């Protein structure tokens, strides 16, 4: 007949989560995986029912009562922390030598693998836990690949949306973006101001120095505008040499006037291209969007256009606020009329 020590060695291969108990309830052999759960304790020699607490079946207080429940499913957990839970089944040994109890983690196996750093070597090769661990690992790998793919797709979506709202030459917002921003501010009832800026003398740069020089001037002008506004504000290129600046929450005419003067002053500084100076300036019209009189974006742009045309009529290189009573063609209307005359 096989001895308890030999039985324990055999069970290490087949059931590394098992314990061999003698007829007094003391542990005679501890499975290698079970011992790994309590590396700082020597489990062999301890009374099994002092190591674990049975929740089902209830009212079992000694080894004899435990032996009276062969083949019953046991629900138990460690008495000390961490109070890992197990399921088990008891098989009595012949001639009253004691019993073998084989334990498993049940549905908490994934937590146990994480908490105790278990590997496939801690389970018998035939245990379905190995298959489960492989499936979990494969699922984790698939979820990670899916997460990375979603990140790339989200990044591509953001990049596409950003491109759709960006002027490719200057890097500023485009007219489509401006329309969205105006709709948001007006819909929220947020006070803001809008500057319509047109570059003076830009056409002569294109005519005399070529479009490459004109593109360079537009890019430098965009850089100057971005440097003069806050992060919460918006600079948009809405035409060839036309720009709109939106100042979120800023409606103070003194401050806006100072910003406009700085813009004109910076834009009047020569911009070098190919060693040659390009000289431009700017005319600016500003409208305030404050109070219940804000109707819609089209009206605001129309009013800013009137203020811009007023600045043009005043000799260019200056700034005007929109005032009630301003009339005449808007800058855009006059601009189109001048282009038709040039073609004719």
Image (cartoon, rainbow, N blue to C red):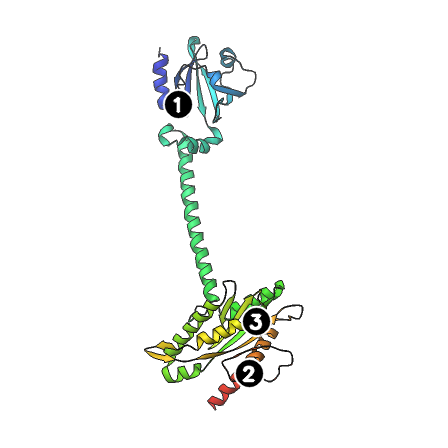
| On-image quarter of the N terminus | top left
Q: Is residue 235 visible?
A: yes
Q: Position of residue 77 (x, y in %)?
A: 49, 23
How packed mark 2 is, by other alpha carbons closer than 10 Å (few <14, some 14-19, many 20 or more), is: few
Mark 3, mark 2: which one is toward the viewer?
3
Label 3 with label 2: CB-CB less than 8 Å:
no
Q: Residue furthest top?
A: 95
Label 1 or label 3, whichever comes before in sequence order: 1
Residue at numbered disc 2: 333
Residue at the (36%, 79%) spot, across then down:
277
Q: Please determine whether, in this image, residue 158 is positioned above or below residue 99.
A: below
Residue 2 is left or right of residue 90, and the answer is: left
Q: Secondary structure at mark 2?
A: helix
Q: Position of residue 151 (x, y in %)?
A: 44, 53
Q: Residue furthest bottom?
A: 344
Residue at numbered disc 3: 254
Residue at numbered disc 1: 40
* Mark 1–mark 2 distance (CA, rounded to whole Å): 87 Å
Q: Is residue 15 visible?
A: no
Decide which of 313, 169 is in the foreground and name it: 313
Q: Residue furthest right?
A: 292
Residue 100 is left or right of residue 300, and the answer is: left
């Amino acid at each position: 007949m096989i001895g308890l020590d030999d039985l324990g060695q055999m069970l290490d291969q087949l059931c590394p989560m098992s314990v061999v108990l003698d007829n007094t309830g003391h542990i005679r052999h501890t499975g290698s995986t079970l011992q790994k759960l309590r590396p700082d304790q020597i489990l062999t020699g301890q009374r099994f029912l002092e190591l674990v607490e049975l929740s089902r079946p209830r009212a079992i207080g000694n080894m004899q009562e435990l032996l009276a429940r062969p083949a019953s499913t046991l629900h138990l957990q460690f008495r000390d922390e961490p109070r890992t839970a197990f399921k088990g089944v008891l098989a009595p040994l012949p001639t009253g030598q004691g019993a073998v109890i084989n334990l498993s983690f049940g549905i908490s196996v994934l937590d146990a693998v994480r908490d105790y750093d278990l590997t496939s070597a801690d389970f018998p090769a035939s245990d379905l836990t190995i298959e489960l661990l492989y499936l979990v690992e494969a699922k984790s790998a698939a979820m990670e690949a899916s997460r990375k793919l979603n990140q790339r797709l989200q990044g591509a979506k953001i990049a596409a949306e950003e491109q759709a709202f960006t002027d490719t030459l200057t890097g500023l917002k485009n007219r489509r973006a401006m329309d969205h921003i105006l709709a948001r501010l007006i819909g929220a009832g947020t006070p803001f101001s809008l500057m319509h800026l047109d570059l003076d003398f830009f056409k002569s740069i294109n005519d005399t120095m070529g479009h490459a020089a004109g593109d360079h001037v537009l890019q430098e002008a965009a850089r100057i505008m971005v440097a003069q506004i806050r992060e919460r504000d918006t600079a948009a290129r809405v035409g060839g040499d036309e720009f709109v600046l939106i100042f979120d929450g800023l409606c103070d005419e003194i401050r806006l006037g100072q910003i406009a003067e700085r813009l004109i002053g910076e834009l009047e500084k020569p911009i070098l291209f190919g060693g040659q100076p390009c000289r431009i300036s700017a005319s600016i019209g500003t409208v305030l969007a404050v109070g219940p009189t804000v109707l819609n974006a089209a009206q605001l742009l129309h009013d800013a256009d009137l203020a811009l045309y007023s600045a043009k009529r005043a000799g260019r290189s200056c700034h005007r606020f929109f005032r009630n009573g301003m009339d005449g063609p808007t800058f855009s209307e006059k601009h189109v009329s001048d282009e038709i005359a040039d073609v004719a």
